[in-house]
Image (spheres, grey):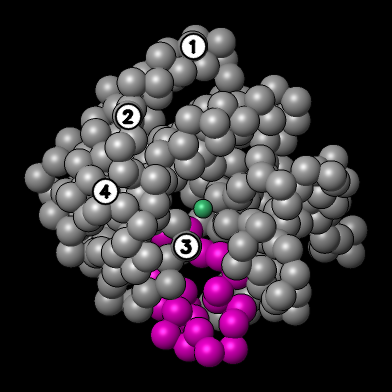
Amino acid sequence: MSSEKHRLPDLRLIDTHAHLDGPEFEHDLDEVMQRAAVAGVAKVVCMGQDEPTSRAAISLTRRMPAVACAVGIHPHLAAGARTDWMVSLLAEALEDGDRVVAIGEVGLDYHYDFSERSQQRSLFADQLAIAAQHTLPVVIHCRKAYDDLSAILKSGPPLGAGAVVHCFTGSFELGERLIAEHDVYLGIGGAVTFKNARELQEAVKLLPLHRLVLETDCPYMTPVPYRGNRNEPAHVGLTCAAVASLRGMSTQDLAAQTTENALRLFPRLTASSV
Ligand SMILES: [Zn+2]
């Protein structure tokens, strides 16, 4: 094989979870996206967390061909949240051919408990129903709430178009259980590069490759060696390299496989690819 095949830009990565609409990227998003392109990041999926951020994410997709988005309400903001805006926004956006590829990020957060748990649960179920109605996959945020997550996924509205548990940092057993019970994908981010993340590294080594996707969760979760700085989509390559080395694969092969997974998870991303 020629050495040209091994240049970094030949990677075709997808950052499946990012927050690009906030003040952190206000001044240099164009440069950030240029660096992502140079690093081989073909697409970035920007998450909604409420109505304004979901609308901002859709606006970004109109301005930047490499950005797709999800719309949804984060569990932190569940208190008093309504979903009626989401239904009309989706009707418009899907009709206009906007790159809305999922409902997210939604779920349960019992670590911070910023909203009452009962409100988180009912908002999560409502958004699962909206996702199923529109045949959209779901991007799930879950912290210290896996039992309730599983209960809702079992008894609530069915996952009509699949889901990803983003920022997965659990054990092999937990990952295996989530895949077996709910057929989900697992989003692997910068945490896998942390020195103290042995349990996660062990899990990522053994979990089924066809269920793993890569993410930055930027501006948060910055991988080594940039920990402490703002995270950005270009850094998804560092996570790719870390996972590849754990699994004894080339970075190129891991990039190709996880990108194939991301396109399977988000079929509308394929349809809207540049
Ligand atoms: Zn997020």
Q: Amino acid at mark 1?
A: Glu
Which one is earlier in the sequence, the residue at label 1 or at label 3? 1
> Tag 3 or tag 2, which sits nearer the N-term?
2
Disc 2 marks which amino acid? Arg
User: What is the crowding at mark 3: few (fewer than 14 residues within 10 Å), some, or many (at least 20)?
Assistant: many
Q: Which residue is mark 3?
A: 167
Residue depth check, mark 1 versus mark 2: number of the one nearer the observer: 2
Q: Position of residue 97 (x, y in %)?
A: 56, 15
For residue 92, the mark is 1
**What residue is shown with label 2?**
82
Quadrant where the N terminus sits is: bottom right
Disc 1 secondary structure class: helix
The residue at the far front in this view is 80
At a point 32% along the width and 61% down the height, the residue shown is: 113
Residue at horizontal 31%, vertical 53%? 115
The residue depicted at 42 percent of the width and 36 percent of the height is: 72
Is 247 rendered above or below residue 129?
below
The answer to the question of whether label 4 and label 3 lie on touching residues, with beta carbons closer than 8 A, is no
State yes or no: residue 164 in magenta. Answer: no
